[in-house]
């Protein structure tokens, strides 16, 4: 399963036009999802006319909620990654992907690198 970060959802229209390898993986049958926090960040936009509907269709409505387990894992990895304020939201996003056993797609790889040794599987989203 591929789990998408907000910036990766924003990139979907461009990636679709380019035939990006991430698009090919999903159209080839690999499941795709995003956390509800990522969907919130994406939805506040700004978005063009059909971007939200296209992203939702691409994800096949697989928006994973934040669970108690995710919240506890996010707190743990936030603390273990150094308790930097900038990690708070990213720790929650990472925790949902870790729980889902997903490969995480982001254009901000450096933001999520601190969570790799704590279980996050980052995908290289640059072609």
Image (tube, rainbow, N blue to C red):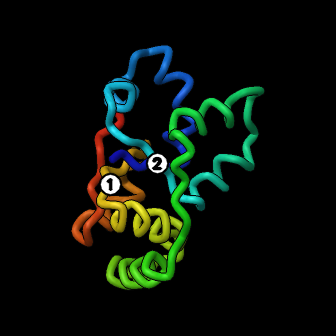
Residue annotated with mark 1 = 102
Asked whether the residues under the numbered discs 2 and 1 touch, taking CB atoms below 8 Å apart as contact, a structural biologist would say yes
Q: Between 49 and 100, which is closer to the camera in this rendering?
A: 100
Quick check: 31 above or below 120?
above
Name the residue located 32 percent from the left edge and 82 percent from the top edge: 80
Residue 92 picture location, percent across and down: 49, 70
Name the residue located 37 percent from the left edge and 41 percent from the top edge: 31
Residue annotated with mark 2 = 33
Residue 118 picture location, percent across and down: 26, 72
Q: Do we see residue 127 in this rendering?
A: no
**Numbered label attached to residue 26:** none
Q: Residue furthest left?
A: 117
Q: In which quarter of the image is the C terminus?
A: top left
Residue 71 picture location, percent across and down: 49, 80
- Decide which of tag 2 and tag 1 comes sooner along the chain: 2
Name the residue located 47 percent from the left edge and 24 percent from the top edge: 15
Secondary structure of the residue carrying numbered label 2: strand
Residue 72 picture location, percent across and down: 44, 84
């Amino acid at each position: 399963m591929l789990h998408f970060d907000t910036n990766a959802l924003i990139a979907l229209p461009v990636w679709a036009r380019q035939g990006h390898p991430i698009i090919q993986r999903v159209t080839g049958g690999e499941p795709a999802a995003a956390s509800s926090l990522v969907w919130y960040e994406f939805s506040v936009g700004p978005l063009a006319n059909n971007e939200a509907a296209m992203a939702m269709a691409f994800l096949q409505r697989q928006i994973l909620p934040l669970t108690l387990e995710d919240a506890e894992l996010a707190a743990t990895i936030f603390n273990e990654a150094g308790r930097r304020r900038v990690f708070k939201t990213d720790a929650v996003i990472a925790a949902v992907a870790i729980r889902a056993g997903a490969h995480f797609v982001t254009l901000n790889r450096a933001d999520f690198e601190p969570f790799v040794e704590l279980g996050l599987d980052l995908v290289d989203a640059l072609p």
